[in-house]
Amino acid sequence: MGGSGKTTTAKSIYNRIHRKFVHRSFVENIREACENDNYRGVIHLQKKILSDALKTKEKIDSIGLGANKLETRLRGKKVFIVLDDVTSFQELKALCGNRAWFGTGSVIIVTTRDVHLLNLLEVDHLCKTEEMNKDDSLELFSWHTFREACPAKDFNQLSKKVVAYCGGLPLALEVIGSYLYGRTKPEWESVLSKLKRIPNDQVHQKLKPNVTEILNGCGLYADIGISVLIERSLLKVVKNNKLQMHDLIWDMGREIVRQSSPKEPGKRSRLLFHEDVSHVLAKNTGTNTVEGLILNLQRTSRVSFSTNAFQEMNKLRLLQLDRVDLIGDFGDLSNHLCWVDWQRFSFKCIPDDFYQENLVAFELKYSNVRQVWKEAMLMEKLKILNLSHSKYLRSTPDFSKLPNLEKLIMKDCQSLSNVHQSIGDLKNVLLINLKDCTSLENLPREIYQLKSLKTLILSGCSKIDKLEEDIVQMESLTSLIATNTSIKEVPYSILRLKSIGYISLCGYEGLSHDIFPSLIRFWMSPTMTSLPRIPPFRDMPLSHVSLDVENNNNLGLSCLLPKLNSLSKLRSFQVQCHSKIQLTRELTRFIDDLHDANFTELETSHTSQISVLSLRSLLIGMGSYDTVINTLGKSLSQELRINDSIDSFLPGDNYPSWLAYTCVGPSVYFQVPEDSVSGMKGIALCIVYSSTLEIMGTECLTSVLIINHTKFTIQIYKRDTIMSFNDEDWQGVASNLGVGDNVEIFVAFGHGLIIKETAVYLIYGQLTTMEIEPILEVAAQPSPDVEIELLPKTNEKIFIRLAKRVGKCLCLNQNRDLNNF
């Protein structure tokens, strides 16, 4: 804002370094130079720059000619130019054009109240002047008032009051400090009293032009208006997204209003001062000019006025009262009210004759209401309803007539025991705050239908003991704050909320990507004593969990899943990474954690013992099991019977119903073919391994990982899931495969096994009986050293016939024992 020290700072820099430049110019007070005649003002400033920089006088008849001369005369020269107090982009274009005008090493400093201009200019460095701190403010004030660095002893407290009023604004400190020089204590007191109502004229005049210009251009369009005010440094956004205005700007704005009708406050657009408001209401002198009225009494006693005093104020839009009672017909209040903030409202219910259809915000904090409305009325414009600290309120209102409500705030309503089920009708609600509603025992099930809700606050609701699994329906929920409740169990479904960003629940508080790994890790491995304890999840089924691994998440996938096979409820776990590097890192960590150092030792130590190991195969089916198992049964049996070499075991791409991809080792790569996803019925994964007779592959299988290198995802299926793969599991696999995706499937085994070859078969269509019958005829003479392990869900009749023919056959389904056939 004006007077914050921009020009002083620029001058200080100029004085320090200007001798390093032959061509230099300090152009001061551009706002004032262009205020009365912008055209001539800009031409005058162009002449000044050329005169200062080149020590010559130039004849300039137009802004365009001046810009051309600046460009041609200064091109290639190393210049230092300060443009002070710029007000428009046109001024910048005329005075410094673009970087091509000047040579290497040039420095251009621009001071302005409008940061938007600097953004348009694409400056290299942006420096915002801040208010001075208390100590520096007191020193600056003292130099102007007492001609020394500290206040005179008897004026120390008075000086601090003046400094507090100036709010760190250098201009105010200098002007008011100089004005108080040599004055007595009574004169100081008088000046302070006056400043509280009427700002110093010099300070006022310095600030007023910018404020008036902006307010005239806002047209009360809040979105752009507030943005412009922030750009011009008249407003700033502080903690909790609140707007803050410098006290001097606030005072100056009130003074502008006061000067519109100094002697008749009832003719001002806004009634702000206590004495003025009380006078207007007591004498009934309000007019249709009044648009806003504020009367906040800070003492304990209340005052009363008649509603008749509002009859003429029929354009009143803002009404803010505290400890004020109105007596009479509420129909006298303006129908144009859009914001009512009435603290300590004494009525037990809002009067029926109070017109509220145009209200956008209705705040009744610390009220005595027992019931908000006797009958619900349609309030289509209402967006904010705040009933906080209403200690007698037992039930929320009926929300069915508040279709556009965005914020419901009912903090510390100690008697509130019922939330109306119509809360589910609030299709546009963003915030529900029920903090410290200590009598509230439960939430209506309908609240979980709120798909637009972003923030839910239940902290201090000590009687609420659970959150329903339906919370997963709150698809927009970003913040859930529920500390100091009786909630002991976390619903599983909360892990599926992709929008959730902040959690405060069951002793955990912070960003969700920090909290969720802790929740999941405890849930997955409850015996890990190194982790802080959290109450367990409710005993309800959860099939799939998705985790978005942030770049700053140091936990890693390996820490989240230390004992994958110990999980009884989880069927799959998907991890979303954000880069190839991160995907590789997480995958490496996980695999290292699974195999540890013994994996390498196992491979090297047993290589020489291959001859004494049995060659076996394992078939894993995902999707259409009958198709997968029966199609591959023939080839597996035949290949292992007749192949003496260990170089190649698995069948290739010899069948019209599958696409085959084969690799050496525990993983296989493939690219999803075109038009394959929609027609794909399943995936068969075949592994040939060597092992001792005592160790079977199904006993050592740890998990199967499906890595999509294109989408940066890792899908993890534990052994128990693989053994009972269902349709939902298959849909999870298929939904993450897109045409052209580069995919890797990794099979993780424990100790004692050496994987020789892995193949993946993408299965299409259904097999007919004619295709199945030949399979039953080929396994008549299996080798005694060959064993085929069949996973469950194989067709019953085919399973029995294969079992009789293949010889040693391992049945993995706990309900099927070979001896029973």
Image: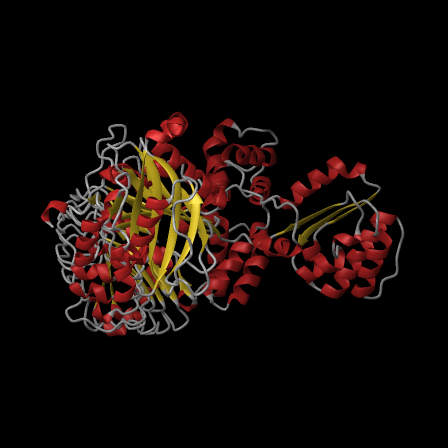
Q: In which image quadrant can residue 750 be found?
A: top left
Q: Answer yes or no: is residue 771 visible.
A: yes
Where 522 falls versus 6 (above or below)?
above
Left or right of 99 in this view: 440? left
Colour scheme of the rendered structure: secondary structure
Asked if residue 624 lies left or right of residue 316, the reply is left
Residue at the extreme right of the image, as rendered: 56
Q: Residue at x 51, y 66 (%)?
A: 218
Q: Residue furthest front?
A: 781
The image quarter containing residue 172 is top right
User: What residue is shown at x 21% (from left), y 63% (from top)?
Assistant: 423
Residue 179 is drawn in which quadrant?
Answer: top right
Residue 279's spot in the image, x, y percent?
34, 62
Q: Can residue 454 be seen in this view?
A: no
Q: Pinpoint residue 209: horizontal percent, then vertical percent.
A: 59, 59
Give whichever of 405, 654 is nearer the camera: 654
On the picture, is 579 further left or further right than 721?
right
Measuring from the top left, give residue 617's x and y in whole percent.
Answer: 31, 43
